[in-house]
Amino acid sequence: MMKTLTTIRFFKPLACASLFCLPMLTTVPAIAAGNAVSGADVYNAECADCHSLKAGKNKKGSSFVGLIGRTAGTVPGAKYSDAMKSSKIVWTPERIDAYITHPKQVVPGGSMKYDGLDDAKARADLIAFLATKS
């Protein structure tokens, strides 16, 4: 009897916690796992003219080295719009996905001359590739 009560006391809070957390987990947008090899091709076609893969080398846009986890507008020597500098965005895979889908919606007033990438698989591949550039 004592073992049963102890078990119930232990598992009841866990059951309640999992019921509380389940709805939150189902509302988080999922980013499909991308292919980094294919993402290199997406980078070359969509990003390479303006963004470098060398640390400290900026082009029209900032270097992509260490992009994931970085706060927007913080690469030394890169030119940013006031909108990007004040955005306070931290570049997570989800934020990168949203930004490269609709840059002007995510950072209104930004200076990037890019209309967005509609292809969800290409975006996932690009993000997987960028994740290898830390």
Image: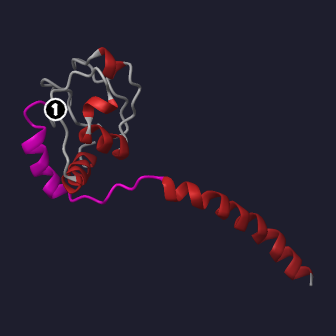
Image x and y of residue 76, in percent: 27, 20
- Percent position of residue 27, x then y: 50, 54
Q: Determine whether 106 is above or below 26 in the image.
A: above
Q: Which residue occupies 30% across, 45% down? A: 97
Could you tell me the amino acid type at mark 1? Tyr
Residue 102 placement, left or right of 115: right
Is residue 89 found inside the magenta-colored segment of the image? no
What residue lies at 37% left-to-right and 38% top-to-bottom? 69
The one of 58 and 95 positioned closer to us in this rendering: 95
The foreground one among 26 and 91 is 26
SS at circle 1: loop
Please give left or right for residue 14 compared with residue 59 in the image: right
User: How many numbered dots are placed on residues in this image?
Assistant: 1
Where is 86 relative to 72, above or below? above
Which residue is at 13% across, 38% downward? 47
Image position, residue 17 (x, y; %): 69, 60
Q: Which residues are magenta?
A: 28-51
